[in-house]
Image (tube, grey):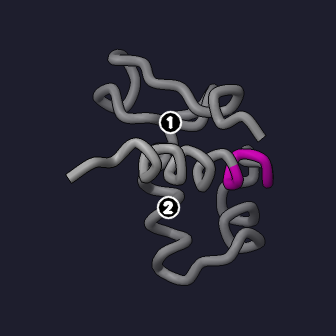
Amino acid sequence: MDWKDRIEVNPEVAYGKPVIRGTRIAVEFVLELLAGGSDEAYILENYPHLRPEDIRACLAFASHLMHEYRA
């Protein structure tokens, strides 16, 4: 899974936050849903234009950021 195929950053969309390509849904929003206990089925039911690959891309993006993080 290459998150770059599904995540985009555009200063004109969502104040430049990373979003799922073609939407205004921020990666951080999807991650907050998951962290709050929502499962994939709930997210897909409530945001039917999203695909399972979008959720996995959000997780892959978060993992990428953690690999890059240095204190």
In this view, the residue farthest toward the front is: 70
Residue sitting at 36 percent across and 34 percent down? 17
Question: Label for residue 48?
Answer: none
Decide: marks 1, 2 in contact (CB < 8 A)? no
Q: Quadrant of residue 49?
A: top right
The answer to whether residue 65 is left or right of residue 7 is: left
**Which residue does the numbered mark 2 point to in the structure image?**
31
Task: Name the spot of residue 21 as percent of width and height, x first.
Answer: 62, 29
CA gap between label 1 and label 2 equals 11 Å
- How many marks on residues? 2
Residue sitting at 52 percent across and 44 percent down? 64
Q: Main secondary structure of the magenta part?
A: helix
Residue sitting at 63 percent across and 28 percent down? 4
Look at the image and give the residue range highlighted in magenta: 52-56
In this view, the residue in front, 32 or 3, is 3
Q: Secondary structure at mark 1?
A: strand
Give amino acid for label 1.
Val
Q: Residues within 10 Å of mark 1 (few under 14, many from 20)?
A: many
Is residue 54 one of those drawn in magenta?
Answer: yes
Give amino acid for label 2.
Leu
The answer to whether residue 68 is left or right of residue 61 is: left
Task: Name the spot of residue 57 as percent of width and height, x first.
Answer: 66, 45
In this view, the residue farthest toward the left is: 71
Task: Name the spot of residue 52 as percent of width and height, x first.
Answer: 79, 54
Question: Label for residue 19?
Answer: 1
Image height of 17 relative to 56, above or below = above
Task: Name the spot of residue 20 as percent of width and height, x first.
Answer: 59, 37
Is residue 9 one of those drawn in magenta?
Answer: no
- Quadrant in which the N terminus appears: top right
